[in-house]
Image (tube, rainbow, N blue to C red):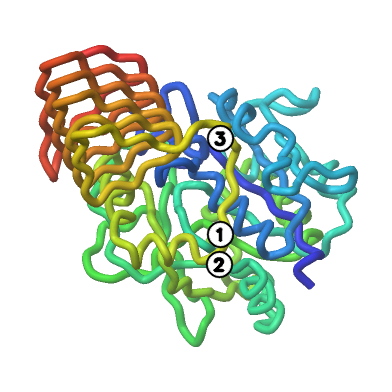
Amino acid sequence: MVNSALGIIFPNQYDELVPELTSERLMASIPFASRYRMIDFALSSMVNSGITNISVLARQNYHSLMDHLGSGREWDLSRKNGGLTIWPPFAQKSMSVYHGRIEALDHIISFLKEQKEKYIILSDTNIAASFDFKDFIQTHVDSGADVSCAYTVQPLPESIMSAKLMNKGMYYTYDIEDGMVKNMYINPQVEGDQNFSMNIYCMERELMIRLVREAYMQGGVYFERDILLKKLGELKVSAYEFTGYYGRISDMKSYFDENMRLLEEENLEALFSQPVYTKLRDDNPTRYYDGAVVKNVMAADGCVIEGNVENCVLFRGVKIGKGAVVKNCVLMQDTVIEEGAVLDHIITDKNALVTAGKEVRGTDTFPVFVAKYQVI
């Protein structure tokens, strides 16, 4: 059954929540968990569930994504039939920069009509999770629903409720009765646990083509607002609760917090309960020099540590000089911290440099961000 599913990933959704990290990349390309990108989790979950025909519909800033994904070899998606397809804007004469899922899907409607899979999966990349799409599809089939929606039960993040977003309908909650969605709310401002959409959906491919074509001709833009909400009385929409571990990125603080949560072993094991694949970078193992003091650190390959490091997530190629003190930090690829520098509650983008003797401090509620190639 699951081998009959086509996966579609939207890598640009929620870029506006973390503008510091998406000025030159998209949400899908944001580095996460020491050596991965956010798209690795959705992509790996699909592959682990037997989905081997996957399309990525990029909108902008997709150079780093294409560099990361390549031919899809690391995910076993370099295939003659199916495999990985990346759709940048203007890939076809009829395509343009899309605003919502309806526009994006309508742009590739000819491609979708040619596919053989019975079911289709839609997913974003702002959530890192080990998602069992095989169970999701089987539950959808057993329910007899037209559409199935995945959700988590949690309070709505304050950062999302207070965000000033250009896109409309950025987040959704459900009223659920006997496993079925009875109502849907767009951008609600409510406290307490909510049935918070993961923006992951399953339906038959031919049904989706019909719904998208109809909505597009009527000027629809957003899948949830212009299809699901409008047709709740016509469609049978089931709800699938995801109870596993997940990290949802909604602003810079949540990005920092979700990385730091992975320093707890039980969280790390839960997120990586299935294999997560990523682009390989051949590098030396991390080297710890004499005098280095390291405590509770996740370090990728290629790091060089001579100083004092505690409660940190280090990406590939990070260098920490002798006498430097680095605590509670997320340091992205090839960041260099020179001798005697002091950092606390800092996020650095790739290739950032903190020169010798400098002191940079943030707080638990406001981690300081150092941009790509910035020198302090």
**Screen quadrant of the N terminus:** bottom right
Name the quadrant containing residue 140: bottom right
Residue that numbered label 2 is attached to: 149
The amino acid type found where label 2 is placed reads Cys
Q: Which mark is residue 291?
A: none
Q: Left or right: where does residue 322 sit relative to residue 143?
A: left
Residue that numbered label 1 is attached to: 200
**Which residue is more in the foreground, 12 or 145?**
12
**x 51%, y 56%: residue:** 199
Question: Is disc 1 in contact with disc 2, using a CB cutoff of under 8 Å?
Answer: yes
> At numbered mark 3, what does the secondary structure look like: helix, strand or loop?
loop
Q: Left or right: where does residue 44 sit relative to residue 50?
A: left
**Which residue is more in the foreground, 295 or 125?**
295
Closer to the chain start, of discs 1 and 3, is 3
As drawn, the residue found furthest toward the front would be 290
**x 48%, y 74%: residue:** 241
Closer to the chain start, of discs 2 and 3, is 3
**x 67%, y 26%: residue:** 89
Residue 285 versus residue 353 in the image, above or below: below
Between marks 2 and 3 in the image, the one whose residue lies nearer the viewer: 2
Residue that numbered label 3 is attached to: 99
The amino acid type found where label 1 is placed reads Ile
Residue 31 versus residue 261 in the image, above or below: above
